[in-house]
Image (tube, rainbow, N blue to C red):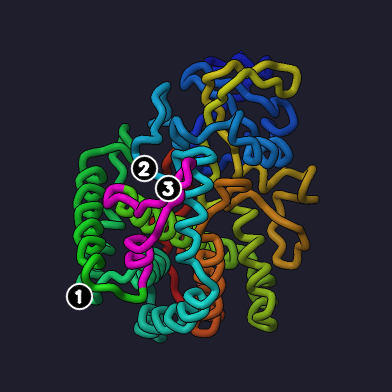
Amino acid sequence: MTEGTTTPVEDLYWDPFDVDIDSNPYGIWRRLRDEAPLYRNDRFDFWALSRFADVESASTAPKVFSSAHGTVLEIMSDESMAAAHMMIFMDPPDHTRLRGLVSRAFTPRRMALLEGRIRELCAELLDPFVGSGPFDYVQDFGAILPSMVISALLGVPDADRAHVHHLIDTLFHLEPGVGMINDVAFTARIELFEYISVQLTERLTTRRDDMLTDLVNAELTEDDGSVRRLTLQESSEFALLLISAGTETVARLLGWSAVILDEHPDQRADLLADPTLVPNAVEELLRFEAPSPVQGRWTTEPVELHGEVVPANSKILLLTGSAGRDGRKYPDGDCFDIHRQFDHHVSFGYGVHFCLGAALARMEGRIGIEETLARFPELTVDRAGARRLHTSTVRGWTHVPVRS
């Protein structure tokens, strides 16, 4: 039995902090699905579900698999995080009320208006590199585009967007041995929170057609029927969540698109020949390489899974990255195929916590790939110079040097 697991499977070990495992987790995920679909890690005190059906089922049972104790392993604890006013750390009914309120900002009209602006931003970012030699696809494009889009959606003034982009980037600063929970990232979070709070306060007297104004105007109906506005703390936390989640997911998606299409030039050629395939290619990219492959939950009662009982008040990780590769749901799940037909995946979450900005992320991914292929039909990745991002919940690339 391997140290750190009570699962009686020889030489099988997984945790989300191990950089070597994270660099190539696919074989271990396959073994987890086949040999230990309910996995126990004593070293870090968590359980894990790796099959698609189990991840999907747990995602639709928030009363049993709660988000209120955190969704990232290193911050999960006995204490509820509901006081943080972040929707991602709430369960129904509080989550339901707030989600319905905030979702109004992602209206079809606003999404339609954004499409043209996203194409303009792609042109601004990519055109300078046409015929100019190598560039970093993530640092020069993939990580910048979503922060610019979310800043435009929120209503961040043009003069402030470079500074806001810097703060967003710093939110994801990693310290060796510490990870995402560090002073640099925390300081950036405080500064960005304070900036958003000032912008929201200004919207009280100067209304605009943006999401920050929507948050200021939003009215919440409580259980007793009373109606109130969001507090400044609540609206600031919502905006901060949208900035961080919306930026990180798309940055990883675009980074993976460059790497994977470079590894599959025949399928890239198919996309060049028929751009209508790009939307399905985005879904296949998300299934094949989930930008956030691990989601934490907290059991509120004992639950029996695969013949074992997970006690109440246990940490349980939903491996969305593994679920996307599960052959029980996707034949040849470890094969990338832009022509694959499937009904859905869990890479944006599932159930009540399905990603609020999924439609925007899909649009940014689609347009980003379309505009990239139009300018760089034979983009080649320098794998020796590529650098990965390693966290317990986000997986992808921070640097992808390319040449056309």
Q: Residue at position x 34%, y 52% from top?
A: 230
User: Residue 213, image x and y in percent?
Assistant: 33, 67
Assess whether residue 323 is covered by the magenta stretch: no
On the question of residue 192 being in view, the answer is yes
User: Residue 121, image x and y in percent?
Assistant: 39, 79
Q: Which portion, as a residue range, is magenta?
A: 210-233
Q: Earlier in the sequence, mark 3 or mark 2?
A: 2
Q: Residue at position x 60%, y 57% from top?
A: 286
Q: In which quarter of the image is residue 265?
A: bottom right
Query: Alpha carbon of mark 3 to alpha carbon of mark 2: how far?
Result: 19 Å
Answer with left or right where residue 71 lies relative to residue 237.
right
Whether pointer 1 and pointer 3 mark residues with C-beta atoms closer than 8 Å, the reply is no
Reading the image, the residue beneath label 2 is 85
Q: Give the numbered dot on residue 159.
A: 1
- Per the image, label 1 sits on a secondary structure element best described as helix
164 in relation to 232, above or below = below
